Structure formats: structure tokens, C-alpha cells
Image (tube, rainbow, N blue to C red):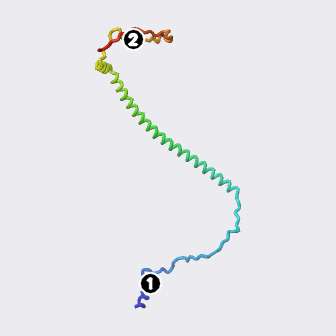
Amino acid sequence: MAARALAVQGAVPTSRRRPCWTGTPEIYFVKPIDNARLVKIEDPSRGREMKQFGLALCCLFLLVMTYAWQHFKAIEYGYKIESLKAQREALVEINRGLRLEEASLRDPERIDTLARRLGMQSPQAGQVIRIDIDTESPDAGTPVLASAAPVAVVSAR
């Protein structure tokens, strides 16, 4: 049985046959190379070219970074402007509401109603003295002497 197993192992299946021509055989030869005695000669024109190339790359890098910085700053300022516009619109709306509230609080009918609830009365004839300052007269810039006029006191008791 062992002989039969060896025969089976040694047999090459027909589907896995090796072709008769496998191409050029690859042969490697070992060739020791010693570069320890070589000395590199400095080429001044090559060094100058490399310095110019490095300088050109630095300038290009600076230009690209400056452009990118300006671009991102422009985007940042755009966002800031939009934020400030929204804030301004909100403040304009608040201002509009406050002016409306001021107008309703300054309504003479409302003030008269509140004054009557507090027991106040309308002024009598002669109690109100209007002071009109004429700005077109030549004496508009001169000081005026203050004077006190007798005022009648009205009590609501």
C-alpha cells in the first residue's frame, strides 16, 4: 500500500503539466562593489541651481499662503458681515417696537386719563405760561435775567 501511495504522489496530473519552454532563465551574478574610496566632487553650478530652485519654491509657497490667508479672511469677514446685518435687523425691529411703545405712552388722551385717576385737574386760565425763545432776534445769544412770577397753588382736597 505504501508503494502505491508513493506512485500516486510521484504522478503528475495531466492538467498541471509544465510547458516545454519556460522562457529565459534568470541568472544572477554576485558582483561586489566597494564605493568607499569614491569622493564626491562639489559642483558650484549645481549648488547655485538648487539655491535658486529653493528660493523659487519659497516664494511660490509664500504667494500661495498669502492668497489662502486672504481668501479665508474674506470668507470670515463675509460671515461677520452677515452676522452684523442680522443683528442690525434685530435692533431695528426692537427700535421700531420701542418707538411704538413710546408713541402709545405719549398719547395725550392716555396721559389725561391717568392724571384724572390720580385726582389732577386741567390748568386754569393764566396758570400756564409759555416761554418762546426767538432764535432769529439779534439778542438771542445774550443772557436773560431770570424772574419769578407768583404761582397759584391748587389743591385737590
Determine which quarter of the picture holds residue 117.
top left
Q: Position of residue 96 (x, y in %)?
A: 37, 29
Which residue is the site of mark 2? 130
**Residue at (30% x, 20% y) in the render:** 118
Find the distance from the CA under tag 2 to the CA under tag 1: 131 Å
Please state the total of marks drawn on the protein image: 2
Residue 69 against residue 150 in the figure, above or below: below
Element type where label 2 sits in the image: loop
- Circle 1 sits in a helix, a strand or a loop, which is it? loop
Report crowding for label 1: few under 14, some 14 to 19, many 20 or more residues within 10 A (C-alpha). few
The label on residue 12 is 1
Give how far across and how far down residue 106 sits, in percent: 35, 22
The residue closer to the viewer here, 153 or 86, is: 153
Amino acid marked by disc 2: Arg
Whether 109 is drawn above or below 44: the answer is above
Q: Position of residue 92 (x, y in %)?
A: 40, 31
Say left or right for 98 vs 116: right
Amino acid beneath label 1? Val
| Residue shown at 53% from the left, 76% from the top | 23
Mark 2: few, some, or many residues within 10 Å (few <14, many ≥20)? few
Mark 2 / mark 1, whichever is N-terminal: 1
